[in-house]
Amino acid sequence: MNRPIHIHPNNSKCFEFRDKPISLITATEHYGAVINRPFRFEKYLNDAAEKAQTLTRLFILFREQQHSHNPYSTCKPESTDYISPYPRTGPGKAIDGLPKYDLDQWNPEFFDRLHRFLSLASERGIIVEVVILSNTYNDDIWMLNPLHPQNNINHTEAIRYPEYLSMRHPNIFERQKALVRKIVEETHRYDNIFYEICNEPTGATPWVENAPTLEEVNEWLVALAEVIRETEHSLPYKHLIAGQEAYRHDGYCQGLDASFSRMFFDVVNVHPLPNTQYQNVTYDLGGFMSKQLRLRALRDFCLATYHERKPLNCDEDNIASRFRDYEGWTIHRKRAWTALMCGAHYDYIDFSIWPNLETGTPDSQRYIRTWMKHLSVFIHSLDLARATPLSDIIRRTPPNVLECVFAVPPHDYAVYLADERELENPHAGEPIHGELEIELPKDSYEVAAYSPETGLYSPAMPFSGGQAVALTIPEFRHDIVLRFRKTK
């Protein structure tokens, strides 16, 4: 086996996989590829590889309910289609009317599907974020969980749902540790995976009396991380652990200082939220499924954390994911470009993908899925091991334009320009034209315009550096990239 995906030895903000630098970029399905029996993940992975996607997330246990925001996804199977790590043996019926689970046994069907999924992803060079546990969010979702006492024959404790993310109940906690250990033992052979212990860990739930505090949830995360490290201690390879510290459910107040500096994470995941806090600064990264853009806050947050010696992964962007239309997809294209051009990584949930629609719809194929391919191909054309964001070479842009520069000085400079107007602005999306003032080193370059929408370059033109130069940019809608490459 090759060494598993790891942080690049020459650049702590990107990864190395099979001896090549890699950036994580995806428009992914909603994580249920293994747990949802009708989902034909072979078709999904084939299309993801064709679209140059480098990441997918995979939930191991969590099962979600349908609701109005996103009624369909692979993580919302019907009870008869849900494949758990535990077999349904009975005696007795679970809350959903099917036989109860036996937590003392492992389900062969689940692990067969898991290995087939990981093997196919490996063959296609796709990284899989293996998400072992998740927030349960409310009583209704907790009632779907095999560890709920009414769903198994093993007498787990009756708890309030926020306590699932704590060590308060020894029986449930031992079951969680056993699942973490089993997943690591089963998957350690794969070089294309890393782990996340818990999706969206929250604490201090205000409407539940004496709910676990943020500190309790973090202690629970640390204890489960120790299970991973202990299990891997005698194994030949060690895998990265990604995640984030616990955050407050009320107000989506998400602090990240400990995630970068004090906690065990190798990779810091952030799910963009309105109150994301880093070093006493609050960044409004957008409301859940709001169709907001918030490009400047996203850029500034990514740049503020760039000095940290851990990759930043915008791990689940749901800013407009329920809007399966040109506007929503354009928002995610621009946010994806902004994140990657600031040295971060990006995962947008593509809710056009369901069972029997494993490659999306004709429109999502034409737009967001093809756009993400353009982004992946472009970003991997840069020397990622030496690339870095720059904030001091752009002197002026046209009005309403946000700039991001990702460069390999002094040879290769990519300047991403995006219309940052929100949709409520009546002029959002109208053509932009004007001048860009840029200062490059005193060398000769060729500059070409690249379209994130079409994936095409314009003819290259000569450009001389050495002083601030005003350059008339081609008229564009939404976004454009100017790429300056040294000629001698």
Image (spheres, rainbow, N blue to C red):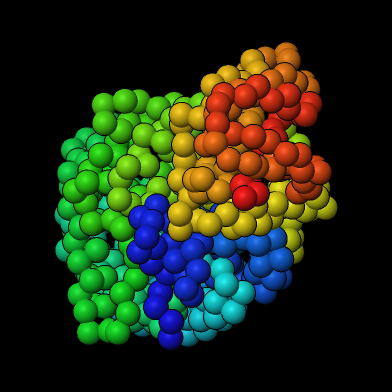
Which sits in the foreground, 270 or 397?
Answer: 397
Judged left or right of residue 16, residue 398 is right
Q: Which image quadrant: the N terminus?
A: bottom left
Judged left or right of residue 11, residue 398 is right
Q: Position of residue 250 (x, y in %)?
A: 35, 30
Count of labels shown? 0
Which sits in the foreground, 435 or 305?
Answer: 435
- Vertical position of residue 80 compared to residue 243: above or below: below
The image quarter containing residue 50 is: bottom right
The residue under the point 21% across, 51% down is 263
The residue under the point 43% across, 61% down is 15
Judged left or right of residue 240, residue 353 is right
Q: Position of residue 429 (x, y in %)?
A: 74, 24
Asked whether residue 394 is in view, the answer is yes
Which sits in the foreground, 317 or 176?
Answer: 317
Which sits in the foreground, 191 or 156?
Answer: 191
- Vertical position of residue 449 compared to residue 377: above or below: above
- Vertical position of residue 423 compared to residue 339: above or below: above
The image quarter containing residue 235 is: bottom left
Asked whether residue 352 is in view, the answer is no
The residue under the point 69% across, 55% down is 373
Q: Position of residue 482 (x, y in %)?
A: 67, 37
Q: Position of residue 56 (x, y in %)?
A: 54, 61
The residue under the point 27% across, 52% down is 165
